[in-house]
Amino acid sequence: MEKNHPPSHEHVDDQMYKLEVNLDDIPGEWLGYVMDLLLNNGANDVYYTPIFMKKNRPGTLLQLLCSIDKLDAMKDILFRETTTLGIRYYPLTVHRLERDYEQVETEWGTINVKKGFYNGQLVQWAPEYEDCKAIATSHQIPLKEVYAAVRRHETR
């Protein structure tokens, strides 16, 4: 199994921000567009949660995580591209595991695997979904079979 990315070191990142907006009057098509814009401009994570707002109106809670240096860019996108009139944001600390990567050879091809270490011990081991999906699609086999093949090579 050969490595294809340099490892990262476990650390606590205390320069992160979480931003939130409640949206009850935005077309669903816009949400995917906004997510892409946020991610392409430096958001670490973006997700949506269905909520109920005033007067029992259904809405969407948009939340994102970004580094402090991306805060203004994220606010700019949210104000320009959504229907929100206000953004809640607050500092957040993120503990990031040390990460290392390896490649696993299966009978159908190579799959990249991400490993996470906590205090020097391997605690996470996950095949890259897109690699597994591509192999499942090209070989017309169930995705779960690809994952099972990769798991047989797990090196805990």
Image (cartoon, helix red, strand yellow):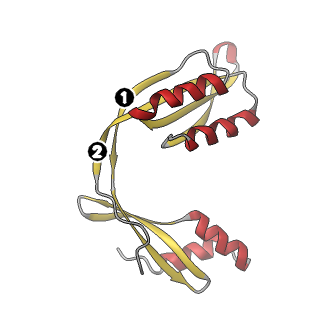
Precedes in sequence: disc 2 or disc 1: 2
Q: Position of residue 56 (x, y in %)?
A: 68, 17
Q: Residue at x 69, y 40 (%)?
A: 32
Residue 121 left/right relative to 153: left
Residue most extreme to the bottom: 107
Q: Position of residue 138 (x, y in %)?
A: 72, 76
Label of residue 12 in the image: 2
The image shows residue 97, relative to residue 21, as above or below, that is below
Q: Residue at x 42, y 76 (%)?
A: 154
15 and 57: which is toward the camera = 15
Residue at which label 1 appears: 91
- Kindly report the distance in space between the C-alpha atoms of the residues bearing marks 2 and 1: 13 Å
Residue 27 left/right relative to 121: right
Q: For numbered disc 2, what is the local secondary structure? A: strand
Q: Residue at x 39, y 32 (%)?
A: 68
Q: Position of residue 120 (x, y in %)?
A: 24, 63
Q: Residue 59: which quarter of the image?
A: top right
Mark 1 residue type: Pro
